[in-house]
C-alpha cells in the first residue's frame, strides 16, 4: 500500500506541480543516484524540478519521453522506483567501500 501511495503521489504531484523541487518527495540520495545514472554526470547542487525527476525515474522504467508521449504513467514510475532503489544501494556500498582502508 505504501508503494502504491508513493507512485500515485508522484504521478499526481508531477502533473499538478511540475516546477516543485524534487527534494520535497525524494531523499537526497535518491535523486542524486537517479541523476548520476541517467545523466552520466555529477548531480547539481540544487535539485531538479519534480517533472524532470519523475521523467528520469520513469525512463528507468521504460518511459521513452518522446515529444508527444505526455506524462509518464504509474507502471513506468513504479518500475523506475524499483531500479532507483538499487542504484541508491549500490552508491552507498561504493561510498562505504571507498571509506574503508585496505590493510
Image (cartoon, helix red, strand yellow):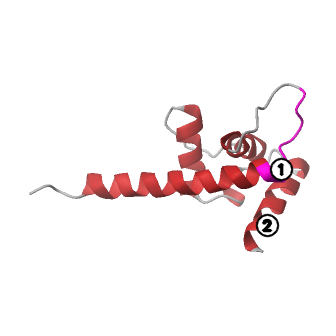
Please identify the dominant SS of the magenta region. Answer: loop
Asked where in the image residue 8 lies, by quadrant, the reply is bottom right
Is 20 or 59 nearer to us in this picture?
59
Q: Is residue 70 magenta?
A: yes
- Residue at figure coordinates x 66%, y 54% from the top left: 81
- Residue at figure coordinates x 81%, y 27% from the top left: 66
- Secondary structure found at label 1: helix
Q: Is residue 93 visible?
A: yes
- For marks 1 and 2, the one nearer the N-term is 2
Horizontal side of residue 9 vs 92, given as left or right: right
The quarter in which the N terminus is drawn is bottom right
Horizontal side of residue 103 vs 58, given as left or right: left
- Where's residue 58, x and y in %? 73, 44
- Where's residue 3, x and y in %? 73, 67
How many callouts does the rendering have? 2
Crowding at dot 1, Cα within 10 Å, few <14 / some 14-19 / many 20+, comes out as many
Q: Which residues are magenta?
A: 68-75
- Where's residue 42, x and y in %? 49, 37
Up-down: is 84 above or below 4?
Answer: above
Asked where in the image residue 44 lies, by quadrant, the reply is top right
- Residue linked to disc 2: 4
Horizontal side of residue 58 vs 34, given as left or right: right
Q: Is residue 72 magenta?
A: yes
- Secondary structure found at label 2: helix
Q: Is residue 44 visible?
A: no
Is 45 or 77 nearer to us in this picture?
77
The quarter in which the C terminus is drawn is bottom left
- Residue at figure coordinates x 72%, y 50% from the top left: 21
Mark whose residue sits in front, 1 or 2: 2
The label on residue 14 is 1
Amino acid at each position: 500500500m505504501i508503494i502504491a501511495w508513493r507512485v500515485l503521489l508522484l504521478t499526481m504531484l508531477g502533473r499538478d506541480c511540475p516546477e516543485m523541487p524534487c527534494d520535497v518527495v525524494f531523499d537526497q540520495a535518491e535523486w542524486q543516484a537517479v541523476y548520476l545514472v541517467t545523466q552520466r554526470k555529477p548531480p547539481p547542487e540544487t535539485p531538479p524540478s519534480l517533472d524532470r525527476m519523475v521523467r528520469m525515474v520513469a525512463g528507468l522504467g521504460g518511459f521513452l519521453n518522446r515529444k508527444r508521449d505526455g506524462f509518464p504513467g504509474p507502471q513506468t514510475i513504479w518500475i523506475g522506483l524499483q531500479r532507483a532503489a538499487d542504484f541508491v544501494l549500490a552508491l552507498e556500498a561504493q561510498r562505504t567501500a571507498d571509506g574503508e582502508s585496505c590493510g
